[in-house]
Structures are given as structure tokens and as C-alpha cells.
Image (tube, grey):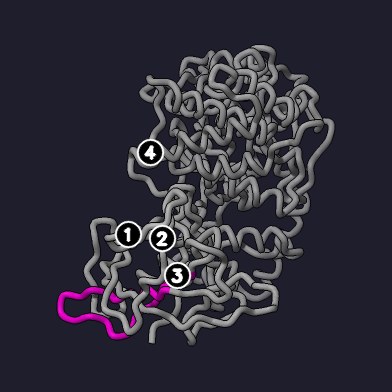
Amino acid sequence: ASIGMKLPKGNGEDKQLTIREIGDQIGMTHPISVMDVREQDELDGWNFGDMVEYFEDEDRKYNYGSNSPLASPQHSTPGSPASIPSTMKRKRERQQRRKRHQSLPRVLNQISLEFSPTPFAKSVKSPQFVRDLDWIDNVWPKQRRVAGDYPSVQYYCLTSTSGCYTDFHVDFGGTSVWYHILSGEKVFLLIPPTKNNLKLYEAWLCRKDQNDIFFPDMRGVDDVTGEEIKVESCVRTSLAQGQTFIIPSGYIHAVYTPQDSLVIGGNFLHGLDIKGQLNIHCLETKTRVPAKFRFPSFVQLMFYAGKEYLKRFKDSHGTVHREEVQGLRDLVNALRQWVVPPGGDARAGSVAHVGMECVAELQSYGVTSVEEMLNLLEEELSRGEEKIGVRSPGHKQKLKLCIKRKKLASPISDIQITKKGNDETPSSPPKLKLRLSGSLMAHIQQKAKAEDSPTLDEDGLPDFDFGVKNSPAKAPSKKKPRTSTYRRPADLVSKQNQVPDDEWLPDSSSSSIAGTKPKTQRRLKLKLRATSATTKATSAPKVTISRKKGGVRARLMKGR
């Protein structure tokens, strides 16, 4: 009750809910999917009434109860005669255990009964914070929800007998999970969704001998360093009756049932870990997870979420949290991949139909197509990132560089700057804005830190001195020009590690070279020297500025 959750109660004096009382509300004839844990086979033709009879079977309870001959053996005191059984006695005990194992009833597990459309749903409510975050409650169209057309993943009833085990898995679509123990006990093994862990998990899913490998023992090799990688951190936690548990998005987990258990729970998507949810969806696609084991209407829900976030940005009273802003760029990029071109499948409920629904609802904002919706959302997102100071991982960083004239061996006064069609030589030094890609920025920072610990500015970028030098012009080449690439230092040079240059193109108000196209290119070399508190670096990277018709190309080179 303290977290706004509503729980069902039994009719007995202790108010303890039984599986038969659950069956009376769900319906004894309601079909269910049952798994034979020992054989890992799915049993067909079962209904909830069959599970009730299986749970209440006295022979099964005896075989797995505390008085069962299969219970943990009582160990004798070391040194006593009973602690040193003869070889024949141990052999007879093994034979007896083998016979009892063969005559055991099956261990059955049921973990996929979604009871939203049943009367039992009236007595259950998920925690309040789950309902506040859940995209199905807040993003999915209400008219479709009322009609019963929505992903039914919010309320599950799990009935597991003693000895049940569910191997390591990630809940579909990277959903988070709320989990409440009505009776019994559960033991969880939890592994965080780090980059290495997800890589090993994907490799584990694709192995033919998957059932013979305990996932925490999985090993692999890093593609970049070639070093061995292993599963990082595996945590064990036990849940008792009356406890509620939240599994974060993407966590790899296994579940063991020490005693008969009744559990209610549900799955939900939200905006606090959009990137993690998309990563799991892509992993499911790569590993070819069957559709029946995936989140229903996942892509459609993503489009509804994009539309909702655009409305929140536009609404003066709308709220978008920092964690949501950090993941929205990944959502926009994913939606661009899922856009269905005009003329595609537009049946009710399809991705194309959902896109048209979103556009129709956003007409008041001047949106006429899904592409315009995504463009507008990206513009609003950029403003939101600047407002709260968030830099998305995939967003290119910008650095403004001022090129100052110094004493040169040969002057560059013959280079004229044209502004708005009029030829005039500027009285002040020209300024160029150079946009560096993330890879170049990382290299500059790495180089700067290696050179006598240079000072950093408020943005964490190295403070540089700049010098301009006239470079000899190259003769024109008859060969087809190739896109220049940046090569890493000599000790790391590899064709696989080449990064394309980032190109800067001036707008109509920017300067351009006057006159006709020259036969040879005239270059300005910009030398970056890291400023240190004690000394200046003698060897630093250079940026070559090549003036061309229609733009300027910049390339970072190793300093000499």
C-alpha cells in the first residue's frame, strides 16, 4: 500500500490467497502455457484448473516437502561410524536415489498468464510509480486502450512449484519488471546489462551447446584489444512472501523457486532508459527471437512515444526529464529507420497506419508527414539539450578556432576574400569556424594530455596556441579525387581504423575565394600547440585547411 499497489486477499482468516481462489476469479477453463522444467518441453492443452489440481496434489507435496525422503540428508558428526559408509552402502544409496528420481512427478512452471481481461484484474494494481512511467498507460491512445487493442503485458500471474528454474534471459523489449510474492519464495541471479555482458549473452544465445553452459561462466574475446572478457558481476538475491521487487531494464537474470510460489507482476516500457530498451530490441532481432516471445507492437509504441514527446516539448506546461532527453536522440534515429514510405502497408494497427495517426494528431503544429514530425522533434530535442547542458553520446562536438596571422616567409596578401559579391581585402585577420568530429576531438584531447599536462577550459577541452604557415601548392592531379582520411599515429595505423574527415561548408554570408578556380590549391596549415603551465609542446597535431571552391576541408595530421 505504501507504493500505491493494490493486492488481492484470500477468504480465510489469515487472508492468504490460494491458487484455487485465483482460479475461481480467472476461470478454471482459462487456457495456460505450462513448461516441464526437467525436460524443457511446453505442454499443450492445459487450463488453469489442471494447474490447481497439480498444485494441490498430495503426492507431489510429499515428494518435495520437508518430510520427503528427497529432502536434504541429515549429515552425521564427522568421525562417527555413520560418516564412513562402506562402498557397497554408498552404491545402494545411489541406486535408490536414481529409482526415486525416475518415479518423481514432473516439475511444472507457468509464468506467462496475462490476466488483464479477467475479473481477477479488478483486485490488482501495479505500483503507482510504474503506472506513472508506463508508456502503455501514458502514450498508447486511449481509444485503442478502451477497445482492448493494446499490448497485454502489464499483469501476469506466475504459478511455480518447488524446484522450478528459469534460465538466464532478458525480458522482452528490454522492459522493466515489477514483481510481488503472494506466497512462497524466489531466488534471483542478476547480471547488469554492460557492453561486455550483452556481447557474451548474445554469443551464448547463439551457441548450440547453450544448455550445457552456465552463463556466468561464459568467456569471450574483445574484438579491439584481443583480451579475454568474462561476465561482470552476478548478484544473488532472495525474495520472501510479501516482498516487491523491481528488475531494471535489460538486466540478465535467472530465477529459482525453492518452494511453491504464487506471484503477480508485469512488464513496462518507459522513458528513463530508452537506449537500453532499443538495444535489447535489436539484440532480439539479431538472435531471431520468435515473435510470440517479443514485446507486442513494440515499434508502434515507439512512434506513439515520439509523438507524445513532441507534444510535451511544444506544450508550455509539458515536462521532459533529463534522463528522457538523453535517450530521445536514439529514439529519433530508430524511428527514422522504421518509417514506412508512402504506399506501404497501411492496415489498421500497422506501422504505416500508426504514423498517419501521429501526423493527424500533430496537424496543429504544422506537421504533414512522419519525416516532418521527426525533424521537428529533433529540433526541439536540440533546444532541450542546450537548455539543460546535455551532450548526447552520438552528437558531434563543436570547437571554434580563430586563425591569427603571424610573420610568414611569404605573405598571403594575394589571397582576397569576397564578401557578398564585392572584392575587398579585410583589415582584420579572417576567422574560420572549424567543426571537428568526435573522433578528432578525442584524438586532440588524448594528444594534449600527453604533452606536459596542458590546461583545460571550462568545457574540458585543451587550451591551444595557433600558428599559420603557408604550405607549398600541389600540382593539379588528373586522377579522380579521393576522400581524405585521418590515419592514427604510426603505432596504431590500420586500414580498419581510418576515420573520414568532417567537412565544413560556409553559408551564403561566409567568405569565399575571389576570381576563377585556381589551377593549384593554396593551403593554410594550422599548427596546434598545447599550452602548458610550464612549457609548450614541441610536437603537436596539425590541422590542414584546404581552401576549395564551395567550401573548406580540414584534416588533422601528425605533428613534426
Q: Nearer the viewer, mark 3 or mark 4?
A: 3
Q: Amino acid at mark 4?
A: Arg
| Mark 1, residue position | 426
Residue receiving disc 2 = 417
Q: Earlier in the sequence, mark 3 or mark 4?
A: 4
Identity of the amino acid at label 2? Ile
The disc, 4 or 1, on the residue closer to the chain's N-terminal end is 4
Q: Nearer the viewer, mark 1 or mark 3?
A: 1
Q: Amino acid at mark 3?
A: Ile
Location of residue 255 in the rendering, given as x and y in whole percent from the top left corner: 57, 47
> Disc 1 residue type?
Pro
- Viewer-proximal residue, 236 or 381? 381
Is residue 381 covered in magenta?
A: no
User: SS at mark 2?
Assistant: strand
**Where 375 sits versus 38, above or below?**
above
The residue where tag 3 is placed is: 545
